[in-house]
Amino acid sequence: MNYETRLDVTHGIPAGEDADMDQRAAKKRKWIVAGVLVLAVIAAAVMLTRGGEPEPFTGAEASIPSVTVIVPRQGTYAGVINATGTLAARREMPVGVVGEGGRVVSVPVEPGQWVRAGQVLAVIDRSVQSQQAASATAQIAVAQADADLAQANLDRALQLVDRGFISRADVDRLTATRDAAVARVRVAQAQAGERQARNAQLNIVAPAAGLLLTREVEPGQVVGAGSGVLFSIARGGEMELLAQIGEAELGSIPVGATGQVTPAGSDQSFTCQVWQKSPVINQQTRQGTARCAMSYNAALRPGGFATIALAGGTMVATRLPESAVMNDDQGSYVYVVGEGNKVERRAVELGMISDEGIVISSGLSGNERVVARAGGFLTVGEEVKPVVQGAGQGSGQ
């Protein structure tokens, strides 16, 4: 029996398999076309993002680092100066032993109490001194009796002198005796007054009204002139902040400037006023003290830490982010991109510091291209490719 098999003369492939191969070829062409379309879309997106096809860099251009620069410009800034300091009594009065001292009998006050002028803070035993005062008073009586007797003798002598029974010399002697007796009365009176004054100084009293801050004495303790400070009083309860401020900023703060004080650990703020600036600058810290007065409040405790925001007027200057300012042994400086895109070092003086940046009080005109960050990786004279970040850094507030 003869079977006839049909063959594709051209390809030598059976006719039944020809259709399957055509389908696989068509599917492959579709995948190729789809891939080409995806690559074309990606290329178009890249060109739109970059604004065109970038020119390829040569080997020298590719080695030049790109840096971000800003042109800060000048602006008018509110003079807000942030500082820290220690709370203290504006007028702290130390109180110690004024008299001869002795054994403390009682201490009727406690720290935190308000005291009035002349109030007794500590009572000193005066049993011995009381007897001395009584003795001094008795001496007055003795001296007065002698003076009365001397006066009576003189009076009798004066009646007899005209009759010739008493000579003028006797009268002079009796007169001197009378005068001496009267003088002894005055001496006794002065001694008694001194004893009374000493006794009055035995008790320790408040020299002025105010808030009692400390108490360093207890009943039974023996105190004297060398006992030191036994009490301290904030006169009138007035407080102040001893704000430590840099010498450049201290000069821009006028006496009478107001600020807001926030004690550590508190969310309360208190208004204060600068009433005195230190005439001396600390040589180690290059800071001075601004004394800011405040009224009494229970949240203000002498010796505590606090922050302050002071109004220091306005100024026209440039401002940079903290990342642009660097420091070394020679002081504060920034890097600017000068002619030929070369890096230059520029010394600057720093002004007020805030969350928005650092005000540059001198050293910049505001038109320079200042390296915004990573300046520590550059060297002076190095060529860079500046990329301008923007000119909005110098807007005033």
Image (tube, grey):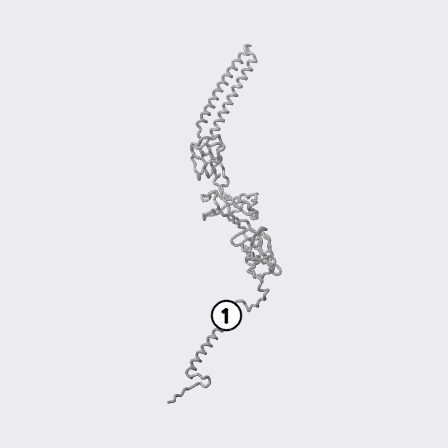
Residue at 52% over, 67% down? 49
Mark 1 sits on what residue? Answer: 42
The residue closer to the viewer here, 21 or 261, is: 21
Above or below 355: residue 104: above
Q: Position of residue 193 (x, y in %)?
A: 49, 26
Q: Position of residue 391 (x, y in %)?
A: 56, 59
Residue type marked 1: Ile
Q: Position of residue 198 (x, y in %)?
A: 48, 28
Judged left or right of residue 10, residue 395 is right
Q: Position of residue 289 (x, y in %)?
A: 54, 44
The residue closer to the viewer here, 323 or 114, is: 323
The residue closer to the viewer here, 295 or 359, is: 359
Residue placed farthest to the right in the image? Answer: 339
> Callout 1: helix, strand or loop?
helix
Instruction: Tell me, yes or no, if residue 207 can be seen here.
Output: no
Residue placed farthest to the top in the image? Answer: 164
Count every numbered label the image shows and give the total: 1
Instruction: Tell me, yes or no, if residue 5 can be seen here.
Output: yes
Residue at 50% over, 24% down? 191
Residue placed farthest to the front in the image? Answer: 1
Residue 339: quarter of image: bottom right
The residue closer to the viewer here, 233 or 347, is: 347
Above or below 149: residue 94: below
Image quadrant in which the N terminus is located = bottom left
Query: Label 1 crowding class (10 Å Cα cut-off): few <14, some 14-19, many 20+?
Result: few
Judged left or right of residue 34, residue 327 is right
Above or below 196: residue 386: below
